[in-house]
Image: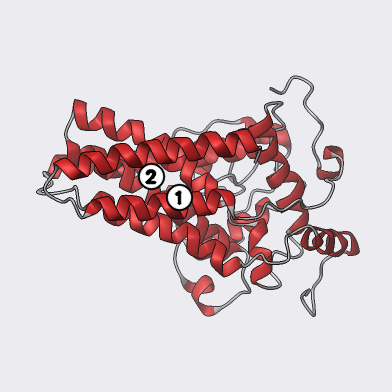
Amino acid sequence: MELATSPMTEKQRAYRSTYRSRIDGWYNGVLHVAIIYSIAGLALWYYSQHIQSVQWWEWTIVPLTFAACNIFEWFLHKHVMHRPINLPGLRAVYERHTLQHHQFFTEKEMRFADAGDWRVTFFPPYALVIFIMMSAPGVLVLSWLISPNVGWLFISTTTAMYIIYEFMHFCCHVEDNAFVRHMPFVNTLRRHHTAHHDKSIMMQRNMNLTFPIADWMFGTSDLNRGLLGHIFNGYSEKHVKSDMSPDASDDVRLSTPAE
Amino acid sequence: MPLQTKILLSVIVVALSGLLAWYESLGPQPHLIWVVATIAMIMIFGLWVFPEAGGGKPEPASDHGLEEDPNAG
């Protein structure tokens, strides 16, 4: 099934049709999402059972982990998902993202036709399994070095960031509606990510898929605004940079730019 | 995902959940063993049952505003 009316090119339409034909017939997008959110939801509940009497200073691990996840997401997107690295696992991530996801969705047509198309946006369930496994040593180390609460809060934040990533990315590819248009953060990311799907800038710009903090920090955003302006930009295109040549993306911004 | 990777990941999930279940059996909340087992089962289900999508033959990278990086990797 394809969208009845769409400005997509024939090339994009043909690719979407080919991609769908390669998905197993029994694929169910709702089941896909249910598996991911069941694992994450149960895991978050399990972590919470080990957190008790948190001291104020133990909460500081949450914003620190949030910031690290934001940079990790930016790094993974820019240097793995958009860069062909000749290691089997990483190459597969590049192909799935740059060569499949970016052909399926372009700046002309960003929408799913139905739940069967969710396969091209949500990561396979094993990605969450790997992500939780990657966080597990952090729990042990932080519990031993600082306190068990810090360890469990750390993995709670990484798992929460993963499902926020999936939710925000999903919201970028749904039909426009009142929720995604008016919800802070979501509306910002929809514009941010739609711009990223423009092939002329997709290798350099708008690499965050939750909150465009690292894009602002490393100067890879298509906006010329401060941090708060970036986060609460919404659908506005008032501050879009006029010069977005590849060279212009090499600037590294660590201080607040002019609003 | 290659078969060997699936097997390795499954073994890690089973080993880690076994360790966590043992840890929980020693603590004050032994009912959490069932939560650990449920998470592990859903993970294994997701790993083995969920279909991969081929997505068709990718177009050459140069069609996407990208030059293949000969130094990559």
Residue occupying the point 30% across, 36% down: B19
Count all numbered tags in the image, as a single digit. 2
Q: Residues within 10 Å of mark 1 (few under 14, many from 20)?
A: many
Question: Chain letter of disc 2?
Answer: A
Which amino acid does the dot numbered 2 rest on?
Answer: Thr
Residue occupying the point 64% across, 33% down: A90
- Indicate left or right for B17 with A93 as reference: left
Residue occupying the point 13% across, 46% down: A54
Q: Which residue is mark 2?
A: A158
User: In which quarter of the view is residue A24 placed?
Assistant: bottom right
- Indicate left or right for A150 with A210 as reference: left
- Answer yes or no: is residue A203 visible: yes
Which amino acid does the dot numbered 1 rest on?
Answer: Tyr
User: In which quarter of the view is residue A20 placed?
Assistant: bottom right
Across and down, in percent, residue A256 comes to: 44, 40
2 and 1 marks on the same chain: yes
The quarter of the image holding the N terminus of chain B is top right
